[in-house]
Image (cartoon, grey):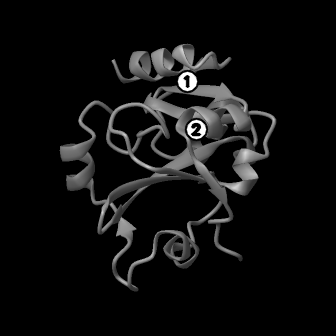
């Protein structure tokens, strides 16, 4: 169901994509391995809770989110932004498997895409389940999500 909703949203937007079934995975890095692609080709979506609601942030599978950089965009105090809990995800994103929320479909959350993902010719994202992914152009992801694009990855 979640994959159908996502592909319908992409179809409506006229976005080209490739559906990629794969073995069940529990992380974006494992997803890359199951698909036989570089972790740089896979983007993970994290759900961040803000005082106003949720923000979906999309960054490379191998990157860590820098909450300070996200705070600069969304404001809020030091503890105002934090990752959504499993309880939050179960309650507010029931149409997706836990930990497999895609950047688009379902609730209408603001989306922030890391610059490195937006600039990729193609990127793989979760399709709402742990055994299906989608490949699409980074620019198309930004367009269909109505996303803000900025550097939100931690500098290691």
Question: In the rendering, which numbered label is found on residue 22?
Answer: 1
Which residue is situated farthest in the bottom direction here? 78
Residue 106 picture quarter? top left
Q: In this view, does 29 lie above or below 53?
A: above
Which structural element holds mark 1? loop
Q: Is residue 7 left or right of residue 143?
A: left
x and y percent of residue 103 in the render?
49, 40
Q: Residues within 10 Å of mark 1 (few under 14, many from 20)?
A: some
Looking at the rendered image, the quarter that the C terminus falls into is bottom right
The residue that appears at 34% across and 66% down in the rendered structure is 50
Q: Is residue 40 left or right of residue 102?
A: right
Residue found 23% across the figure and 36% down from its top: 94
Q: How crowded is mark 2: few (under 14 residues within 10 Å), some or many (20 or more)?
A: many
The mark found on residue 33 in the picture is none
Tell me which label, 1 or 2, sits earlier in the chain. Answer: 1
- Total numbered labels: 2
Residue 85 horizontal/vertical position (percent)? 28, 60
Report which quarter residue 115 is drawn in.
bottom right
Front position in the image: 33 or 82: 82
Q: Quadrant of residue 69?
A: bottom right
- Residue at position x 59%, y 26% in the image: 134
Q: Are marks 1 and 2 in contact (CB under 8 Å)?
A: yes
Residues under labels 1 and 2: Cα distance?
Answer: 8 Å
Q: Mark 2 points at which residue?
A: 31
Left or right of 6? Residue 54 is left
């Amino acid at each position: 169901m979640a994959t159908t909703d996502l592909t319908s949203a992409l179809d409506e937007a006229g976005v080209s994509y490739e559906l990629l079934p794969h073995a069940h995975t529990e992380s974006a890095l494992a997803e890359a391995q199951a698909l036989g692609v570089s972790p740089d080709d896979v983007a993970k979506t994290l759900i961040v809770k803000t005082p106003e609601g949720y923000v979906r942030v999309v960054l490379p599978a191998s990157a860590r989110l820098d909450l300070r950089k996200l705070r600069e965009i969304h404001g809020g105090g030091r503890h105002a932004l934090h990752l959504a809990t499993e309880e939050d995800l179960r309650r507010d994103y029931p149409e997706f498997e836990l930990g497999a929320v895609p950047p688009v479909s379902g609730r209408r959350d603001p989306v922030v895409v890391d610059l490195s993902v937006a600039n990729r010719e193609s990127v793989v994202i979760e399709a709402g389940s742990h055994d299906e992914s989608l490949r699409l152009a980074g620019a198309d992801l930004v367009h269909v999500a109505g996303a803000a694009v900025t550097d939100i990855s931690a500098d290691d």
